[in-house]
Image: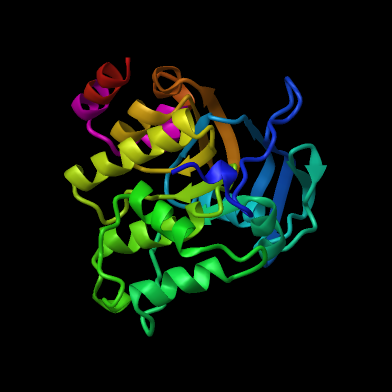
Amino acid sequence: MDLNREGGARRPEPPRSGEPLFACENISLDLGGREILRDISLSVGRGEVLGIIGPNGAGKTSLFEVLSGRMPPKSGRVLFKGRDVTRLALHERSRLGIGRTYQTPVVPEELTVGETLKAARQAYRPFLTRHHAEWGAELVRFHIDEERPTANLDTLDRRKLLLACLLMRRPPLILMDEPAAGLINSEVDEFDDLIRVLSKEMNVAIIIVEHRIELLDTIADRVMVMDAGEVISEGDLARVLADPKVHAAYFENVEEGTLEETQSHAA
C-alpha cells in the first residue's frame, strides 16, 4: 500500500541539495558538574545510515538524549531540515518527524496489541487509520493477534510493535539505540533487512548506536566512534577499525585475533 497518498502520512519533501536532513553542531553536556559530552558534531542525509560505536560510558546514549530532545545541551545546537530545534522538547521533535527507539523495548503492559496500535494512531493529530497501523505492522513483519496482551510479547515482538507504532507516521529520521540488544543472530538479520528497506527504499535517515560490529558492517554508510564524551574517529567501518585511537579506546580488551577477524570482515 502507498502511504504517500494517505492523510497525515505523506513523505516530506527532501531538503535542498547539499543540506543534511539532520545535524548537531558543537554539542556539549554537563551532568552534576561532570562533563558528559564535549563538542560533538554530526550530520546525516536522507537514506543514509550513520553508525555510532564506543565503549560503555562513552556518552552515546547521552548524545541520543540531546538529539531526541529529552535533555537540553549545555552548548551547541540541533538542526532538523535546516531549522534550529535545540529548545524543542521530545514530543515536539517527534511531531516534526524525529523518531526514536530505546535500548529496552518498554511496552504498555496493561494494553493489548490492538489497543497499543490504536493509542499510537491517536497519539496526536492528524489521527491515523487502522490502514496505517496495518501497514506499519506489515512493514516490520509483526503478525500478532490484536487481542494478545503486550505483556506476553518476547523481546523481538516488543521491538517490532514499538517500531510499527513509530513507522506508521513515516518519520524521515529515526534514532535507534541498540536495536539488536537481546536478539539472537537470526532476529538481528531481520533488523538488518528492515533497516535496509527503511534507508534505501523509503529514504529514511537513520542514526544507530550499536555494539554489534557485524550489523553495522552491513548497513552503515559511515561510522562515528566516541570515547569519554568525544568523537575520536569517523569514516567507513574499515577505516575506523584501523585507527590507533579506536584500538586504544574501544578494543583494548579485545583479543588480537578477534579484532583482526573483525577488520578482515569489514574490509
Residue 212 appears in the picture as rendered: no
Residue 131, x across and y down, in percent? 45, 58
Q: How is the image coloured?
A: rainbow
224 up-or-down from 58: above or below: above
Residue 259, x across and y down, in percent? 27, 27
Residue pictured at 48% horizontal, 27% vertical: 245
Q: Quadrant of residue 106?
A: bottom left
105 up-or-down from 80: above or below: below
113 up-or-down from 254: above or below: below
Q: In this rendered view, identify the residue nearer to me: 54 or 35.
A: 54
Query: Horizontal placement of 260 versus 80: left or right?
Result: left
41 up-or-down from 87: above or below: above
Position of the N terminus by quadrant: top left
| Number of numbered markers | 0
Residue 25, x across and y down, in percent? 75, 38
**Overall secondary structure of the magenta stretch?**
helix
Residue pictured at 45% horizontal, 40% vertical: 54
What residue range appears in magenta?
A: 246-260
Residue 34, x across and y down, in percent? 66, 59
Q: In this rendered view, identify the residue nearer to me: 61 or 19.
A: 19
Position of the C terminus by quadrant: top left
Based on the picture, tell me whether residue 33 belongs to the magenta stretch. Answer: no
Residue 240 appears in the picture as rendered: yes
Q: Quadrant of residue 42?
A: top right
Based on the picture, tell me whether residue 256 belongs to the magenta stretch. Answer: yes
Residue farthest toward the bottom in the current orientation of the protein = 110
Residue pictured at 62% horizontal, 45% vertical: 10
Residue pictured at 49% horizontal, 32% vertical: 49
Query: Horizontal placement of 96 versus 210: left or right?
Result: right
